[in-house]
Image (cartoon, coloured by chain):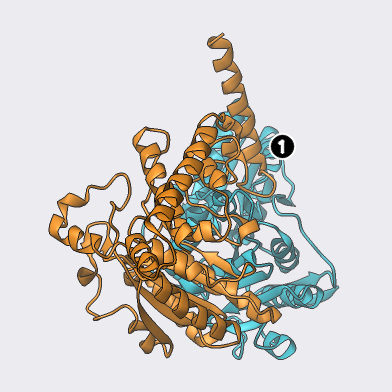
């Protein structure tokens, strides 16, 4: 075990895989000499050289399209998009090309690539450095979508993503990069894609979340504990595929689901979870499903603490749920 | 070479007719552009990799794709190598052809990445990507060629300038006098070739391909040609171009030109030519009959190849779909 920040854990995963497998290459804007604007690729250029750590032109569509070509031709590329807010320049590549590649050619060629991108708010980044675009990708067949929330999961899930035979959108909550440290397993360590993490056990209310809001949910759970409300917190970790077993097990126990994410409410991933609960577990419910999310506005520069699903908003939702 | 031109022309006419008969959903004709396809593809080595757009029938035939497989694709028979997942765009690992996406130009950055992997591994192999004149207006053309100009992987960009993107003339795509000159802005070489001259296309391609295989910079080739047919079977070209214009280009029909050349040079006689056409016609016709007799694909194929392993969510949907099929079968008796 070594104490690592979230960003260092990403770095460790990349370095481990690049040492283990020479097919793994990294490409993106400022990932080489500069080590990435969040320092996730620091030191990789020196160790692996410019053929495996490629500083690219400012060209999101080419970064993703080139990564797809590399993947189709036997490499294991990890492309970095500097902010997920800039991923839309490569959106057509992701949606039309990457996601449909295996299907379009009936498995003759495959697309084992990872697109990493920092996601979410809380860093005073304004409209174009704070968005949570995961639903665009969860609504696209052929992609997997992963959002780790701890340094250990960041390492274990990124290694799994690199080894996965399908394209993975790997969204890294940027406000956790340097604010969080924990013991991370050394060497070989993988976390399976598609398995949720039970963060906190409880009896009365289930909070289902992912990414940075896991910590807001935990803080809210601690607060309502004092009032005698026992809260279970589930970190989905992976949205496509998602761990329905973990959700249903908890909802059957508590009957009171609260779903939390930063992305805007309408058509957010929470809607998918809520709909599936309605389809499968409606008779287990003791209270309506409640969503605590970003609002249906562009991400605001000012008052972002009020926009984000913060602890107070989650506490409020838990109380409303528990009142039923 | 001439035989391949004839085969492309004959098969193209059959594929068009099959669509008109309602046997296929859509077809994008190759007529008029056969020389640019056949001439460039003949200069490829088997280990080179092609990223076509959606019209390069002649390229597929030169690569050795059997006519039967192209028909399986077009008719989505039980033997369709791409399982009916998309329109009749051919692609197959055995022939080093990566199937094209329909969104124009999106194959270009991917082709650059594919070539880059050859460079990283030090393999002496080439990637060629084809696209139309309309594609040069899209961001992915510029992002792809720009990326290639920095990393210099072994790639050749071939623009099939057939004068039209559906109804829009190339003069409405760009203010540049030529497509080839766009290479200059990226620090690369551009060649403008008479795409209706199969020998010119072959010779230019051969020397360019050899140079790029040997580590030369990427190259852009503009093949100046003309789409004699419609854009696809959903298009009516009479709406946007004159009969006179089409007649002018008919005089430069690449198949006729090669025939006239071979006859003038006494390589073949009129009689040889007639028997070649009827032999090819008979061969294709028999292949079409065989393909038409084949059964279609099973419904379950729509769930194949989404992921290496279906997600739990997808598995549930497959089960639901099977249930539905069983119910329908029972209802139908």
**Residue A306, percent across and down?**
44, 62
Rate crowding at label 1 as few (under 14), some (14 to 19) or many (20 or more) other CA atoms within 10 Å.
Answer: few
Rendered residue at 62%/86% (across/down)? A35
The residue where tag 1 is placed is A249
Residue in the foreground of this view, choosing between B144 and A148: B144
B249 left or right of A109?
left
- Chain in cyan, by letter, is A
- Residue ID at (78%, 75%): A16
Which chain's colour is orange? B
Judging from the image, mark 1 belongs to the subunit labelled: A
Left or right of A154: which side holds B290? left
> Along the horizontal axis of the image, is B24 left or right of A183?
left
Instruction: Looking at the picture, tell me which residue is in the foreground, B280 or A251.
Output: B280
Residue appearing at x 65%, y 67% in the figure: A73
Check the picture and name the quadrant holding the C terminus of chain A. top right
Asked whether, in this view, residue B267 is left or right of residue A241, the answer is left
Q: Position of residue B184 (x, y in %)?
A: 37, 88
Q: Position of residue A71 (x, y in %)?
A: 63, 66
Q: Please, is residue B212 above or below residue B173 in the view?
A: below
Does residue B318 appear in the picture of this structure?
Answer: yes
Q: For this rendering, which residue is in front, A182 or B35? A: B35
Name above or below for residue A30 compared with residue B5: below
């Amino acid at each position: 075990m070594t104490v690592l920040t979230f960003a260092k854990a990403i770095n460790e995963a990349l370095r481990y895989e690049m040492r283990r497998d020479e097919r793994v290459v990294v490409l993106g804007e400022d990932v080489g000499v500069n080590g990435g604007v969040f320092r996730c690729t620091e030191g990789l250029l020196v160790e692996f050289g410019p053929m495996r750590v490629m500083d690219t032109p400012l060209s999101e569509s080419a970064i993703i399209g080139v990564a797809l070509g590399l993947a189709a031709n036997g490499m294991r590329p990890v492309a970095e998009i500097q902010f997920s807010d800039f991923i839309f320049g490569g959106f057509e590549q992701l949606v039309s090309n990457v996601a449909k590649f295996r299907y379009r050619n009936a498995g003759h060629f495959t697309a084992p690539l990872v697109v990493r991108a920092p996601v979410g708010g809380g860093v005073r980044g304004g409209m174009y450095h704070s968005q949570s675009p995961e639903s665009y990708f969860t609504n696209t067949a052929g992609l997997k979508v992963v959002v780790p929330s701890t340094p250990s999961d960041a390492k274990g899930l990124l290694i799994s993503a690199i080894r996965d035979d399908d394209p993975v959108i790997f969204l890294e909550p940027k406000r956790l990069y340097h604010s969080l440290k924990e013991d991370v397993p050394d060497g070989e360590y993988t976390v399976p894609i598609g398995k949720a993490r039970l963060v906190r056990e409880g009896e009365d209310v289930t909070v289902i979340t992912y990414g940075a809001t896991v910590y807001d949910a935990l803080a809210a759970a601690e607060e309502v504990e004092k009032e005698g409300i026992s809260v279970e917190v589930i970190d989905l970790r992976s949205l496509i595929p998602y761990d329905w077993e973990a959700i249903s097990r908890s909802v059957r126990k508590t009957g009171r689901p609260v779903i939390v994410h930063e992305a805007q409410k309408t058509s957010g991933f929470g809607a998918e979870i809520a709909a599936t609960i309605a389809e499968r577990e409606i008779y287990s419910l003791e209270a309506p499903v409640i969503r605590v999310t970003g609002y249906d506005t562009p991400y605001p520069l000012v008052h972002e603490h009020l926009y984000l699903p913060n602890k107070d908003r989650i506490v409020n939702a838990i109380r409303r749920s528990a009142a039923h | 070479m001439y035989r391949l031109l004839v085969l492309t022309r004959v098969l193209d006419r059959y594929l068009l007719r099959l669509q008109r008969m309602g046997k296929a959903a859509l077809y994008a004709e190759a007529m008029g552009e056969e020389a640019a396809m056949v001439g460039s593809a003949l200069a490829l080595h088997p280990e080179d990799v092609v990223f076509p757009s959606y019209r390069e029938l002649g390229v597929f035939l030169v690569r050795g794709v059997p006519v039967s497989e192209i028909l399986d694709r077009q008719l989505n028979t039980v033997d369709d190598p791409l399982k009916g997942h998309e329109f009749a765009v051919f692609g197959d690992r055995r022939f080093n052809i990566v199937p094209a996406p329909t969104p124009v130009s999106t194959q270009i950055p991917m082709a650059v990445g594919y070539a880059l992997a050859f460079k990283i591994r030090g393999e002496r192999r080439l990637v060629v990507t084809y696209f139309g004149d309309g594609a040069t207006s899209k961001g992915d053309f510029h992002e792809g060629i720009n990326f290639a100009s920095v990393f210099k992987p072994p790639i050749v960009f071939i623009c099939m300038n057939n004068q039209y993107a559906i109804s829009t003339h190339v003069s409405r795509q760009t203010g540049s006098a030529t497509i080839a000159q766009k290479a200059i802005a990226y620090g690369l070489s551009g060649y403008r070739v008479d795409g209706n001259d199969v020998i010119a296309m072959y010779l230019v391609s051969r020397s360019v391909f050899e140079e790029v295989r040997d580590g030369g910079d990427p190259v852009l080739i503009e093949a100046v040609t003309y789409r004699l047919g419609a854009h696809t079977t959903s298009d009516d070209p009479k709406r946007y171009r004159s009969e006179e214009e089409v007649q002018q280009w008919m005089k430069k029909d690449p198949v006729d030109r090669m025939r006239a050349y071979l006859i003038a040079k006494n390589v073949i006689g009129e009689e040889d030519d007639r028997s070649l056409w009827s032999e090819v016609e008979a061969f294709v016709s028999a292949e079409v009959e065989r393909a038409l007799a084949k059964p279609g694909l099973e419904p379950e194929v729509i769930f194949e190849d989404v992921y290496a392993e279906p997600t739990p969510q997808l598995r549930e949907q497959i089960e639901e779909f099977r249930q539905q099929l069983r119910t329908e079968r029972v209802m139908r008796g």
